[in-house]
Amino acid sequence: ATAADNAAINLENIDLFVVPYPHASHCLLSPNWKNECMHVDDSLIQSQVLDKLNYYKGDLKRRHLFINTMEVFLAHPLLRTIGRSLTLGPRLSSIHSNVNHHDNDELFE
């Protein structure tokens, strides 16, 4: 967003910032795969993702919902503590929500 765009945004009217983050792609496209995406340094996720979010700072962090395209137990440890997230698989904390796989359910195809 440009400075003019940012000036026109009234943050008081925004309840939630939705961040669709293709974490699985970020991990799988990085060389030397390690479980839990440990081959990707925290600083890369910070600089390539979090630092690019204009409003991910201070009290506004809690208003961000990360849609993470990787099961939380395989995700980078940094993303397990990031705040609100919607992931696949089991729920590891009260701030995470999960979506079950519906591979065999025609309603979800």
Image (tube, rainbow, N blue to C red):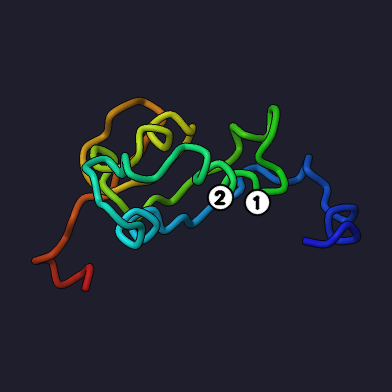
Please tell me whether mark 2 sits on a helix, a strand or a loop.
Answer: loop
Q: In this picture, is 45 found above or below 105? A: above
Q: Residue furthest front?
A: 32
How far across and how far down the image is residue 6, in percent?
Answer: 84, 54
Report which residue position mark 2 lands on: 49
Q: Which amino acid does label 2 sit on?
A: Val
The reply to whether the C-beta atoms of the residues labelled 1 and 2 are less than 8 Å apart is: yes
Report which residue position mark 1 lands on: 52
Quadrant of the rendering where the N terminus is positioned:
bottom right
User: Which residue shows up at 62% across the image and 34% down it?
Assistant: 61
Q: What residue type is labelled 1?
A: Lys
Q: Residue furthest left?
A: 104
User: Which residue shows up at 30% across the image and 51% down it?
Assistant: 70
Q: Which of 22 and 8 is in front in this view?
A: 22
User: Which residue shows up at 76% across the image and 45% down it?
Assistant: 13
Q: Badge 1: few (under 14), some or many (20 or more) residues near its Cα, within 10 Å?
A: few
* Left or right of 79 in this view: 61: right
The quarter of the displayed image where residue 93 is located: top left
* Left or right of 6 in this view: 86: left
Number of residue marks: 2
Q: Nearer the viewer, residue 40 or 36?
A: 40
Quadrant of the rendering where the C terminus is positioned:
bottom left
How far across and how far down the image is residue 14, in percent?
Answer: 70, 46
How far across and how far down the image is residue 43, in percent?
Answer: 52, 39
Q: Give me the C-alpha separation between circle 1 and circle 2.
A: 5 Å
User: Which residue shows up at 48% across the image and 33% down it?
Assistant: 82
* Left or right of 37 in this view: 81: right
How far across and how far down the image is residue 89, in percent?
Answer: 22, 44
Q: Which of 100 and 24 is in front in this view?
A: 24
